């Protein structure tokens, strides 16, 4: 008889570092196991199952070849900056820029992209150039303080934010910032995107916080965003846009933009259909968070109790939590506290009587 493979079996497979190929050929996957495998593929996690995504492995291989740092001689930096692996990453940044522009996630010369290419060196996009029309020669190389070491075009003024994220969150090897309209609308309204509506969003982005507004490009702005990057890979910037970092590569950071923008758009449209949108239960959310933890994606909700998981209070008009609010009957009196209060009350009464 064929073996039925559940989510639990897949989780076990990941834990043991085995390959998908180790499953029996005639194994039957449950629908959620099939979904999980797809999510793992999307997140590039299949490398632990023996299948590295090209962009990611390329970026890691590049790092292995790198023998320079910000203190290296100019001639060595120049050689490195023009080397084949770095040229390939410059092309990849151009490609991501085009995708951002075609999806209308960037406007004018807005948006910026950064990739960590050595311990203290970051490749980044230029300022005053449309992200849809960049050429590899437009890219710059900066140190972790934002000093430009290579590149003829001036580096983006928002590089400080990317660098502060990379310093605060050592797992961040690439970051993307842009202004996708629906997600930015939430950032302008000061409303955190609601949760418990779409699984992909919960696994790859949610929960998404809002960093308070500061002038773009200032160290204060960078700090406020970086402080949130410890527990969140996707962050809304009030009255500005979105930034996402990835531990896998620049394409993965870009995917977060597609996921949050599609999500915010869906939520806005759903809220116009004349019926309060449904949410899934916190039981379901807990399942998703388990998958998320296995994928190594941070989330401040790991370990929270079910009653603490669903918080849509920011969201208007009126998406309510699928967990009913606590009623007075749910609040059980603490017998020990009650005895203590009675004893104190008795003592006070006795004092008054005297
Ligand atoms: Zn911006």
Image (cartoon, rainbow, N blue to C red):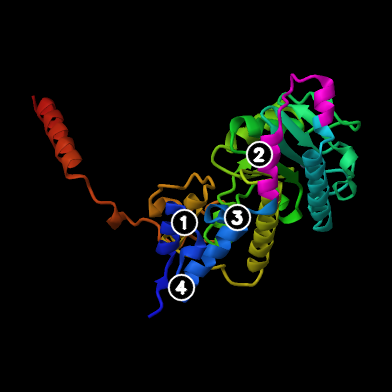
Which numbered tag is attached to residue 18? 1
Residue 153: percent from left, percent from top: 90, 33
Q: Which quarter of the rendered picture does the N terminus lie within? A: bottom left
Q: What element does badge 1 sit on?
A: loop
Is there a contact, CB below 8 Å, between mark 3 and mark 4?
no
What residue do we see at 85% from left, 49% from top?
Answer: 107
Q: Which quarter of the rendered picture does the C terminus lie within? A: top left
Which numbered tag is attached to residue 43? 3
Q: Is residue 27 left or right of residue 258?
A: left
Q: Is residue 354 left or right of residue 253?
A: left
Residue 149: percent from left, percent from top: 82, 25
Which numbered tag is attached to residue 173? 2
Q: Can you tell me whether the CB of the residue at mark 2 lies under 8 Å from the nearest atom of ligand 1? A: no
Write the start and end of the magenta stretch as one range: 55-79
* Residue labelled with disc 4: 30
Residue 345: percent from left, percent from top: 16, 34
Q: What element does badge 3 sit on?
A: loop
Residue 44: percent from left, percent from top: 61, 54
- Whole-angstrom CA distance, mark 3 to mark 4, is 20 Å
The mark that comes first in sequence, 2 or 1, is 1
- Whole-angstrom CA distance, mark 2 to mark 3, is 15 Å
Does residue 267 belong to the magenta stretch?
no
The mark that comes first in sequence, 2 or 4, is 4
Is there a contact, CB below 8 Å, between mark 3 and mark 1?
no
Is there a contact, CB below 8 Å, between mark 2 and mark 4?
no
- Whole-angstrom CA distance, mark 2 to mark 4, is 34 Å
Kindly report which numbered mark, 3 or 1, lies closer to the viewer in this rendering: 1
């Amino acid at each position: 008889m064929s073996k039925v493979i559940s989510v639990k079996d897949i989780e076990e497979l990941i834990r043991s570092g085995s390959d998908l190929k180790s499953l029996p050929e005639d194994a039957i996957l449950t629908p959620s196991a099939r979904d999980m495998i797809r999510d793992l593929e999307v997140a590039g996690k299949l490398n632990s199952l023996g299948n590295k995504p090209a962009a990611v492995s390329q970026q890691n291989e590049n790092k292995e070849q790198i023998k320079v740092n910000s203190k290296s001689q100019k001639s060595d930096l120049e050689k490195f900056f023009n080397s084949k692996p770095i040229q390939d990453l410059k092309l990849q940044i151009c490609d991501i820029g085009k995708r951002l522009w075609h999806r209308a996630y960037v406007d004018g010369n807005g948006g910026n992209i950064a990739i960590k290419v050595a311990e203290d060196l970051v490749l980044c996009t230029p300022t005053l150039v449309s992200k849809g029309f960049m050429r590899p020669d437009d890219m710059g190389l900066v140190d972790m303080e934002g000093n430009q070491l290579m590149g003829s075009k001036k580096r983006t003024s928002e590089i400080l934010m990317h660098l502060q994220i990379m310093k605060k969150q050592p797992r961040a090897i690439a970051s993307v910032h842009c202004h996708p309209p629906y997600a930015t609308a939430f950032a302008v309204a000061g409303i955190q995107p609601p949760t418990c509506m779409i699984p992909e969003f919960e696994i790859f982005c949610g929960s998404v916080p809002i960093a308070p507004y500061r002038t773009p490009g200032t160290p204060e702005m960078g700090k406020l965003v970086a402080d949130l990057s410890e527990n969140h890979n996707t962050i809304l910037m009030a009255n500005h846009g979105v930034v996402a970092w990835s531990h896998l590569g620049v394409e993965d950071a870009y995917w977060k933009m597609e996921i949050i923008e599609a999500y915010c758009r869906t939520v806005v449209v759903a809220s116009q259909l004349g019926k309060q949108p449904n949410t899934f239960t916190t039981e379901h959310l807990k399942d998703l968070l388990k998958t998320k933890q296995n994928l190594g994606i941070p989330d401040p909700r790991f370990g929270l109790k079910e009653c603490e998981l669903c918080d849509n209070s920011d969201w208007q008009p009126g998406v309510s939590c699928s967990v009913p609010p606590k009623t007075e009957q749910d609040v059980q009196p603490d017998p020990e506290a009650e005895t203590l209060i009675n004893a104190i009350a008795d003592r006070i009464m006795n004092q008054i009587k005297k």
